[in-house]
Image (cartoon, grey):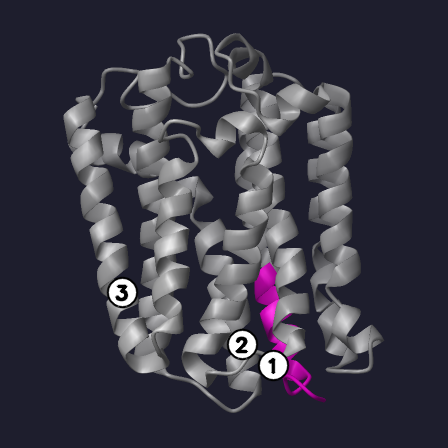
């Protein structure tokens, strides 16, 4: 296997829509408010991607050390546990990737204020402590909550703030469906790995709830995203164009059906990638709806 393919596997490219999608929604809110900083947008987008990749690399390294990535797992081979890359190289790549995220964050702090310093530090720390550190929160069933916060609320609101330096309530509400779909990606991952995680002592939310209730949670998260998308319009702000993401409903129905009925690795791996793609499509439609309706306050 080529070195390029190995590091693409380690970066888990299929998860990157979860990093890109919230930045697009936050930026569309800023555009709708009449503000756009091209360099701030690029820095926020790259910073989010680097944090996602750094988190994936850290997870690859830490799970291998803790024995969570065994040969019988249903997901793709992890490069550290699979012996495709030495642990020291994966750890070094983690440091480099988070270092690039810090460089993007430094620019955003310079143009948008020191408030982002704490946000960036917390985001990187959350990525490291997901499966690293003495008590990784991913092993305690808190992964979905942190994904909702950092790849939903923080990412959308932060992407808006770096361009406008203002925090309207609509930005927080628009972040909710984004966070729900980002968390749904993790739910699929944990449903797939439920048995191997249980044997490794990794008490994810899926392990705690069981397969049936976790499947119901996935359906509830996806449904909740579609229900909350037009909420600012229902509350008397913004426009009915916020219902545009409902065009992705057929994709959501298909994915809910797969997660509810299948237990084999290939099907759930496809559902994992499909959920990431659904989030990206949903967020593109949401961003288009925000722009079509004239943004915040219409």
- Of circles 1 and 3, which is in front? 3
Image quarter where the C terminus lies is bottom right
Q: Which residue is mark 1?
A: 291
Q: Are marks 2 and 3 in contact (CB under 8 Å)?
A: no
Looking at the image, can residue 267 be seen?
A: no
Image quarter where the N terminus lies is top left
At label 3, counting other C-alpha atoms closer than 10 Å, the crowd grade (few under 14, some 14-19, many 20 or more) is many
Residue 5, how many percent across, how many down? 25, 33
Q: Is residue 270 above or below residue 69?
A: below
At label 1, counting other C-alpha atoms closer than 10 Å, the crowd grade (few under 14, some 14-19, many 20 or more) is many
Q: Residue at x 56, y 13 (%)?
A: 198
Q: Secondary structure at mark 2?
A: helix
Q: Nearer the viewer, residue 208 or 236?
A: 208
Residue 170, how many percent across, how many down? 67, 75
The region drawn magenta spans: 283-298
The tag on residue 28 is 2
Could you say which quadrant of the image residue 271 lies in?
Answer: top right
Q: Is residue 135 above or below residue 286?
A: above
Position of residue 210 in the picture relative to residue 102 (left or right)? right
């Amino acid at each position: 296997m080529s070195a390029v393919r190995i590091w693409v596997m380690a970066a888990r490219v299929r998860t990157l829509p979860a990093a890109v999608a919230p930045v697009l929604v936050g930026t569309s809110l800023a555009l709708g408010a009449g503000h756009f900083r091209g360099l701030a947008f690029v820095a926020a987008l790259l910073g989010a991607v680097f944090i996602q990749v750094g988190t994936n690399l850290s997870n690859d390294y830490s799970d291998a050390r803790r024995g969570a990535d065994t040969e019988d797992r249903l997901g793709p081979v992890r490069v550290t546990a699979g012996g495709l890359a030495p642990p020291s190289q994966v750890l070094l790549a983690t440091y480099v990737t988070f270092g690039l995220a810090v460089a993007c964050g430094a620019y955003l702090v310079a143009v948008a204020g020191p408030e982002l310093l704490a946000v960036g530090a917390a985001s990187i720390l959350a990525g490291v402590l997901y499966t690293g550190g003495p008590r990784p929160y991913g092993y305690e069933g808190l992964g979905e909550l942190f994904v909702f916060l950092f790849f939903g609320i923080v990412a959308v609101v932060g992407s808006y703030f770096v361009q406008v330096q203002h925090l309207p309530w609509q930005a927080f509400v628009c972040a909710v469906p984004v966070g729900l779909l980002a968390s749904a990606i993790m739910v699929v991952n944990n449903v797939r790995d439920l048995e191997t995680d249980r044997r490794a002592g990794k008490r994810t939310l899926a392990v705690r709830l069981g397969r049936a209730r976790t499947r119901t949670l996935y359906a509830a998260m996806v449904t909740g995203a579609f229900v909350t998308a037009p909420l600012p319009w229902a509350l008397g702000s913004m426009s009915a164009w916020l219902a545009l993401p409902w065009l992705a409903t057929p994709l959501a129905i298909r994915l809910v059906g797969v997660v509810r009925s299948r237990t084999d690795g290939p099907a759930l791996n496809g559902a994992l990638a499909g959920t990431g793609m659904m989030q990206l499509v949903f967020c593109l439609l949401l961003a288009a709806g925000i722009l079509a309706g004239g943004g915040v306050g219409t």
